Image (cartoon, rainbow, N blue to C red):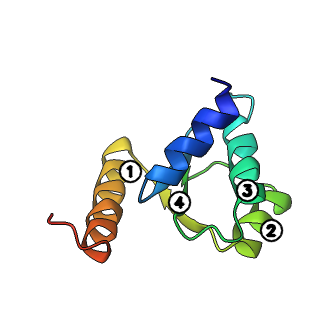
């Protein structure tokens, strides 16, 4: 199965899709994933973009996040990231009527 198809299936069946920008040394694949998901959806409410503090985001990425209503969070440590992700999933489960 092609990678884009896998990404689409995972996004379709999930309550939340997390995209992370954790280090700047990567080639930016998370930006490609974000753009792909946004082109296949009208809104980005269930997409969460996490960025480690200190990492620069281009104006274009900020525009994409704002234009499609993508949720945005920053974090300092992996522990902070995990805490935020767990809280988001708990609220998504409550909204979906699932027990937490």
* Mark in the foreground, 4 or 3: 3
Badge 4 element: strand
- Disc 4 crowd rating (10 Å Cα; few below 14, some 14-19, many 20+) is many
Of the numbered discs 2 and 3, the one sitting upstream in the chain is 3
- At x 30% / y 71%, what residue is drawn? 91
Report the residue marked by disc 1: 81
- Disc 1 crowd rating (10 Å Cα; few below 14, some 14-19, many 20+) is some
- At x 56% / y 71%, what residue is drawn? 45
Does residue 25 sit above or below 51 in this rendering? above
Of the numbered discs 2 and 1, the one sitting upstream in the chain is 2
Badge 2 element: helix
Work out which quarter of the rendered image holds the N terminus and state it.
top right
Going by the picture, which residue comes out furthest to the front? 1
Badge 3 element: helix
Tell me the quarter of the picture where residue 21 sits: top right
* Mark in the foreground, 2 or 1: 2
Q: CA distance from mark 2 to mark 1?
A: 23 Å
State the image coordinates of residue 90 (x, y, percent, origin top left).
26, 64
Work out which quarter of the rendered image holds the C terminus and state it.
bottom left
Report the residue marked by disc 3: 40
């Amino acid at each position: 199965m092609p990678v884009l198809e896998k990404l689409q299936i995972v996004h379709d069946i999930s309550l939340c899709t997390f995209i992370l920008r954790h280090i700047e040394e990567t080639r930016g694949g998370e930006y490609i994933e974000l753009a792909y998901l946004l082109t296949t959806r009208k809104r980005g409410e269930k997409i969460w973009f996490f960025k480690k503090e200190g990492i620069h985001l281009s104006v274009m990425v900020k525009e994409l996040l704002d234009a499609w209503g993508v949720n945005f969070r920053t974090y300092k440590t992996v522990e902070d990231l995990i805490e935020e992700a767990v809280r988001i999933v708990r609220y998504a489960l409550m909204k979906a009527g699932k027990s937490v």
